[in-house]
Image (cartoon, rainbow, N blue to C red):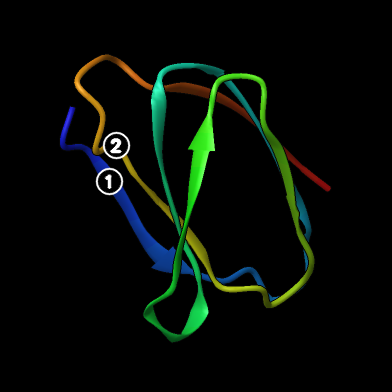
Amino acid sequence: MGASQPRHTHEASEQIWYATKGSGKLLLENDTTKPFKAGDVVRFADKDVHGLLNDGDEEFVYVSVTA
């Protein structure tokens, strides 16, 4: 609740995020956001801007896989 991971990039790796509990917002490039909730999956390629904000009223849990 209120926790965040600031926008950032990875130079030479991709990530896949799988939300397992709660809801929040993806923090994307150009100050855009997108809803992200339990059951959603998202993939970020090399150099994609990404971050997360828990703006829900419960714990947000996700699994991050980096390759």
Which amino acid lies under the numbered mark 1 shown in the image of this protein? Ser
| Quadrant of res 27 | bottom left
Q: Residue visible at 25% across and 15% down?
A: 58
Q: Residues within 10 Å of mark 2 (few under 14, many from 20)?
A: many
Left of 56 or right of it: where is 26?
A: right
Q: Residue visible at 56% across and 73% down?
A: 49
* Closer to viewer: mark 1 or mark 2: 2
The quarter in which the N terminus is drawn is top left
Residue at the farthest right position: 67
Q: Residue visible at 64% across and 68% down?
A: 10
* Element on which disc 1 rests: strand
46 vs 66: above or below: below
Q: Position of residue 33 (x, y in %)?
A: 43, 63
* Element on which disc 2 rests: loop
Residue that carries the numbered disc 1 in the rendered image: 4
Residue that carries the numbered disc 2 in the rendered image: 54
The circle drawn on residue 47 is none
Q: CA distance from mark 1 to mark 2?
A: 6 Å
61 vs 29: above or below: above
User: In front here: 43 or 65?
Assistant: 43
User: In front here: 3 or 56?
Assistant: 56
Q: Position of residue 3 (x, y in %)?
A: 21, 37
